[in-house]
Image: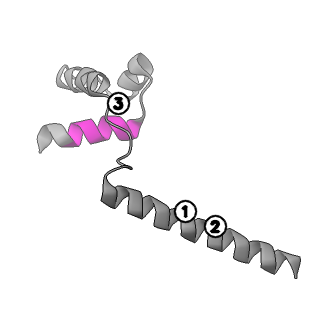
Amino acid sequence: MLAAVARKDDEDRRRRQMEGIKKAQVEGKFVGRKPDLKKRESIASLLAAGHSYSSIQKLLGSSRHLIADVKKTMTA
């Protein structure tokens, strides 16, 4: 019984939180993190120089996802 009450409370809290986030986005107060342009420029230059994803990860400490995202924007 207590688990059901706890689950309901958790669902209500999450629903209210998402409503607040959506409201803030509409008002322009919740915009998310800005991209790190310096890191993206470094990744783009290393990709252009022919470096592999693994070497870029080791050099800059960035994720493969970020590297792939930069590569995708380069070709677009």
The residue sitting at 28% across, 21% down in the picture is: 38
Q: Crowdedness of circle 1 by 10 Å Cα count: few (<14), some, many (20+)? A: few
In depth, the one of 30 and 39 nearer the eye is 30
Mark 1: secondary structure = helix
Amino acid type for the residue under numbered disc 3: Tyr
Q: Is residue 4 left or right of residue 59?
A: right
Task: Write down the region rendered in magenta.
Answer: 64-72
Q: Is residue 9 left or right of residue 75?
A: right
The correct choice, above or below, for 9 with respect to 48 in the image is below
Determine which of the numbered discs, if any, sits on residue 17 in the image. Answer: 1
Query: Would you identify the image quadrant in which residue 51 lies?
Result: top left
Q: Crowdedness of circle 2 by 10 Å Cα count: few (<14), some, many (20+)? A: few
Is the magenta region chiefly helix, strand or loop?
Answer: helix
Q: Crowdedness of circle 3 by 10 Å Cα count: few (<14), some, many (20+)? A: some
The correct choice, above or below, for 7 with respect to 21 in the image is below
The correct choice, above or below, for 10 with respect to 43 in the image is below
Amino acid type for the residue under numbered disc 2: Arg
Expressed as whole percent of the image width and height from the top left, the position of residue 31 reads: 34, 47
Expressed as whole percent of the image width and height from the top left, the position of residue 33 reads: 38, 39
